[in-house]
Amino acid sequence: MKYPETKPPVFTLTAGPVDAYPEVLRALGTTVLYDYDPAFQAFFEDLTLKAQEALGCDLPPLILQGEPVLALEGAAASLIAKDDVVLNLASGVYGKGFGYWAARYAKKVEEIEVPYNTAIDPEDVRAFLEEHPEVRIVCVCNHDTPSGTLNDIDAIGAVVADAGALLLVDAVSSWGGMPTSPTSSQAAIYVTGPNKCLGCPPALSLVAVSEAAWAKIEANPDAPFASMLSFTDWKNAWKKTEPFPFTPSVAELNGLSAALDRYLDEGPEAVWQRHAVTAKVCREGIKAMGVELWPVSEDIASPTATAVKMPDGIDAGPVLAEARARYGISMSAGRAETLGRLIRIGHMGPTAQPAYALLAVAAIGGALKASGAKVDVAAGLAAAQAAWDAAIDA
């Protein structure tokens, strides 16, 4: 059966937006309260403290009313001052992209850039900071989603702390799906969102801000205020006695509350394990089928997305279209430098289940075969099932 492009896919196995948990969808349909109703103000305070528990951060986090690109740009605008020298760590499209925001506000942006199928070496960061003590802020993307690769932000964070600089982390597609936190990475600003591993629609951002970061933001005369990008406007808005800078996204906050409840009830370690097992099942299937993974090593492959390298002479676009048309399964393309060169299979939120990995292996294998690639789909499915069985036995 062919699925017309206008018809929704049967399964969304993308790297974001991801499918939403049923609990979240139900919560989105609950009563939309007036934002100054005492019940909503109490709810927002409780929600912020629940987010603080989940994030494991020292201060109540910001819940910004826009998907995480808003928070990332706001972080650059708030933290970076005109006299700052910034080191941007670019191991992928999104890491590289943050440098453009940084350049808008900084005196100078330095950069360590590596091939987009590798990761940043913390020792390279250490050496750079020793040679450039003027660097005040270091920016890094934890999971560079267009490449499916991970940077070791805990090791990088320790290096940055030793140098007396501040670390700004993009953890949008990592937090909630693996062991990472603002505290373990010693991040000054740690940006994530509920639209990835928490299984919410894209509408909100979660931002952990340290005491040191707040001190720098409040000393920055160019930090935005009375603005969608402002952090300071929202600093105290979590308190039920304080006003909101503007009307919050009430329905999406209801969804976030349900997602956090689900995350904490299941237990973070159990959630992380579920994501890791799903990724393992998927990758074993892809490799056994005769197709390479995009990262140079599985040690830097994210448990929240599998990036599959296209065989020589195969463009990812037609493969994605074939998988959607033939099997009703939507997966993600690359971005910028990785566009056409890889396909990304998301393991986030509700699709972080091994059964979905089997579907992905079957769909990508069948679509590759239809596109002329020599793949062994049966071997891939057998290896994926064996990896799942081994995880159950363990």
Image: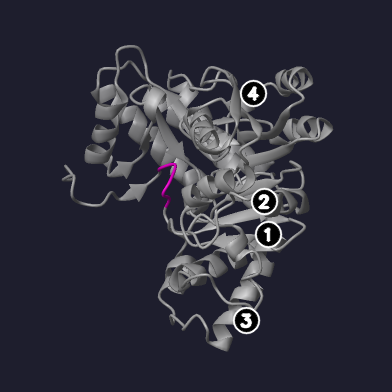
**Quarter occupied by residue 13:** top left
Q: Residue furthest top?
A: 312
Quick one: label 4, few (<14), some, or many (20+) residues within 10 Å?
Answer: many
| Residue 81 falls left or right of residue 352 | right
Asked if residue 165 lies in the magenta stretch, the reply is: no
Marked residue nearer the N-terminal end (3 or 1):
3
Q: Amino acid at mark 4?
A: Ile
Residue at image coords 64%, 45%: 79
Give the label on residue 120, or none: 4
Read off the residue under disc 3. Answer: 42
- Counting from the top left corner in percent of width and height, residue 312 is at 35, 12
Q: Quick check: marks 2 and 1 in contact, CB under 8 Å?
A: no
Asked if residue 17 lies in the magenta stretch, the reply is: yes
Q: 107 above or below 329?
A: above
Marked residue nearer the N-terminal end (4 or 1):
1
Q: Quadrant of the N terminus?
A: top left
Tag 3's secondary structure?
helix
Marked residue nearer the N-terminal end (2 or 1):
1
Q: CA distance from mark 4 to mark 1?
A: 27 Å
**Quarter occupied by residue 135:** top right
| Residue 162 falls left or right of residue 393 | right
Is residue 384 something that shows in the picture? Answer: no
Residue at image coords 63%, 71%: 238
Read off the residue under disc 2. Answer: 217
